[in-house]
Image: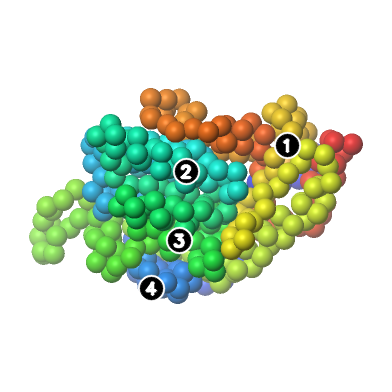
Amino acid sequence: MNSKIWLSSPHMSGHEIGFINEAFSTNWIAPLGPNVVGFEDDLKSYLNQNKEVAAVSAGTAALHLALILLKIGAGDEVICQSKTFSASANPIVYQGATPVFVDSERDTWNMCPILLETAIKDRMSKGKKPKAIIAVHLYGMPYKVAEIQAISKTYNIPIVEDSAESLGSTYNNQKCGTFGDYAILSFNGNKIITTSGGGALVCASKENRDKAVFLATQAKDNAVAYVHSQIGYNYRMSNIVAGIGRGQMMILEDHVQKRRANFQFYKDQLQHIDGIQFLEEPEGFYSNRWLTCMLLKDNTTQEGLRMHLEEDNIESRPLWKPMHQQPVFKDAPKYLNGVSDDLFDRGLCLPSGSNLTEEDLNRIVSLIINYFG
Ligand SMILES: *Cc1c(COP(=O)(O)O)cnc(C)c1O
């Protein structure tokens, strides 16, 4: 059997272990400490927009905190991009609110601004003004930031920017993770940098960031005896995990370049094949190419090619199954145009890790060419 090639696997730099050793030697084995502060500072200076950052246990936890800070509660509605990973939508339900799913456009595969406005108007006509918009930069490609922001402004609905897959991407030279009223990052094992598991909430003010940290550390009021006037969560990042993050920040830019080079390689080698299409960057859009995705002719080709790669121990995956197709969200309101269904039917994510070797890439591409040959 040939060696396994994963879709996206962790890629350590070697710098991580030094930060972890330091945590051990100073006995900072806790859900706070110098690595947490250091990692937050690293993220803050990387994002470079005067944002405030709270490091937490997962991207999902960061999203949940954003919704709590936006006072989303029972009976509220929150708009969410349908084409995404389930973690974008689940925290809406944690708050007892209802997700309203909006389909994608073709240029970026992200939330369609036209449909977003249709959805807002329709919900308002039913007496239900949405309380927030969760927009996602899927696979690293920025969503149409200007258009979505304009709608957010017109209707005065805040944006939660799901930047879990897009650390290192930019829109008009500004980093993804700095556009929403809140933004979230993820450092799960498969993301462009990883802390094994972890996330961050990016806030516009120190006040909001401090509120998030308060909620993430059990909402203990400022008193010697524990006094609680709010429900708290145990969502803070551990000092060990943050040490991995500090080491990973040192090679984030390398990872972006490597993933972009993977995309370019696949495109150069495969675009001549009839029926294969890649997603191009519109003017001003810069993707970290977290995953290289391609569109095929039809669902039969997608499944056939996926099986062909799997037989050689290579992992590939259909694009995310849209949330409006998920059994758990079957009753949620939805505004559709067929785009995300089509992408799900025909799209395939290829192995995209920053640790793929030239040999790995050649092996994958030869198999694909052989499948079509
Ligand atoms: C990974 C991911 C998340 C969740 O992040 P975790 O750190 O795994 O909780 C949220 N949204 C999207 C789009 C993701 O890909």
Q: Give the position of the N terminus as an image quadrant.
A: top right
Q: Nearer the viewer, mark 1 or mark 2?
A: 2
Q: Secondary structure at mark 2?
A: helix
- For label 4, the SS is loop
- What residue is disc 1 on? 296
Q: In the rendered structure, find residue 94 and report the number of the disc placed on it.
A: none
Foreground tag (2 vs 3): 2
The answer to which of 237 and 98 lies nearer the viewer is 98
> If you read the primary sequence from the N terminus, does the residue marked by circle 4 or circle 2 appear first?
4
Residue of label 2: 114
Say what amino acid the circle numbered 1 marks: Leu
- Local packing at callout 2 (Cα closer than 10 Å; few below 14, some 14-19, many 20+) is some
Q: Return the mark for residue 177.
A: 3
Q: CA distance from mark 1 to mark 2?
A: 26 Å
Total tally of numbered discs in the picture: 4
Residues under labels 4 and 3: Cα distance?
Answer: 12 Å
